[in-house]
Every structure is written in C-alpha cells, then in structure tokens.
Amino acid sequence: MLVLGAYVTDAPNDKLQLVPAVASVVAVREVTQVLADTGYFSEAAVAAVESDGGPTAYVAVEKTGHHRTVADLLAVPEPETPTTGPIDRDAMRRRLRTAAGRAAYKKRKETVEPVFGIIKSAMRFRQFLLRGIRKVALEWSLITLAYNFRRLARVLSGATTRPAGNLVPQAA
C-alpha cells in the first residue's frame, strides 16, 4: 500500500486521466492490471492503456450499490469472456462480471481507497494550503511522500495492524 504514482490535474473530470494516471506509476515491478472507477472510463483511454501488450484495464462503467441483495446471493452463470478488439461499455461490463474481473476489481477497495482514508483521517489532510497547479502538485507530492514514509516505517517495524481494544492499559 505505497503510493507509486501521483499527479495533479485541473481537468473538470477524469475521462481523459486514465493514461496519465497509468503513466505516473513508477515501475518497481511489472504492472499487469489497472483498476479504476467509473469516472475514468472511455473506450479510447482503455485502448491506449492496453495497446502494445499493456496491462489489462478493469474500469467500472456503472455505479453499483454497496449493499448486497438477495439477487447477489444467487448463482449467476459466468458471462462469456469478451472477445479481442475494442473495449466498449458492454465489453467492459462483461469483463468486470467474470470471476477474474470481480476478483481484480475487488482489490481496488483494499489498495487504493484506504490510502485516501489514511491521508484524510490519520494525517488530517483535507485541503490544499497552496494555490496554483505547480504548488498544489508539489504539496501533493509531499503528502504522498509523507504517507509512504509513514507506511514504510510501519512495515519495517513489523507493525502491520493497530493494537486491538483500548489504547490505555487496564489494571487487572
């Protein structure tokens, strides 16, 4: 759970940000999958990321609820694997509904989302103090660097989880 790529943009939405986001990642190992939420989907962006043997993109194309229904518990037949060729909304929807797609996209909530929660809650970073794209980019780089140092210190010390229960010792 280290931040390997970070950048700042002033674009009003994320439709054109999938390629720059993937390009911002420092290759410390081979990237085989790209996971992104609904705001990043566009056929051109997915095609650009997957071109020339690039990583497989799993980009949500529709909003889904966070709560399970009875229908979610019923066995559903495995959808056919999308054919090769351009990935449109329907092909991406089928890709995400396969067992491999569900397993891959499920990792997003375990890897990406906690980082933002830790930065906002534990590190108490809720707004930028500087103005201008260059200054904000510098500030975001410092925040992600501080997060990475914090995470590395925790991993190297062997403390992977917080202690359970109260932080104040109780007398027996």
Image (cartoon, grey):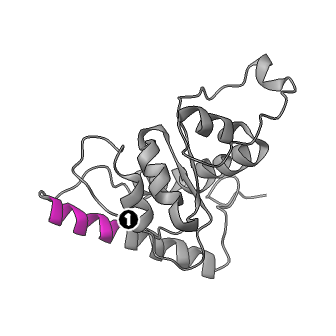
Along the line of sight, the residue nearer the viewer: 69 or 120:
69
Q: What residue type is labelled 1?
A: Ala
Quadrant assignment for the N terminus: bottom right
Please say if 156 is above or below 21.
Answer: below
Q: Determine the residue positioned at 51% across, 77% down.
A: 27
In the rendered image of this protein, does residue 77 appear above or below residue 99?
above
Question: Magenta segment: does it hold 141?
Answer: yes
Q: Residue furthest right?
A: 75
Quarter of the image with the C terminus is: bottom right
Where residue 137 sits in the image (x, y, percent)? 24, 64
Find residue 12 and report its image quarter: top left
- Please, what secondary structure does the residue beneath circle 1 have? loop
Could you tell me which residue is drawn at 36 percent across and 43 percent down?
15
**Magenta-colored segment: predominant secondary structure:** helix
Q: Residue furthest left?
A: 132
Residue 138 in the figure: left or right of residue 98: left
Residue sitting nearer the eye, 158 or 94: 94
Count of numbered marks: 1
- The residue to which callout 1 is attached is 6
29 shown above or below 31: below
Relative placement, left or right, of 50 versus 19 is right
Quarter of the rendering containing residue 89: top right
**Residue 71 visible to an observer of this rendering:** yes
- Residue 170 or 149: which is nearer the viewer? 149
Residue 141 x, y percent position in the rendering: 31, 69
Q: Residue furthest top?
A: 70
Region in magenta:
133-143
Q: Is residue 82 magenta?
A: no
Between residues 71 and 151, which one lies in front from this camera angle?
71
Residue 167 picture location, percent across and down = 61, 58
Q: Compared to 61, does 168 lie above or below?
A: below
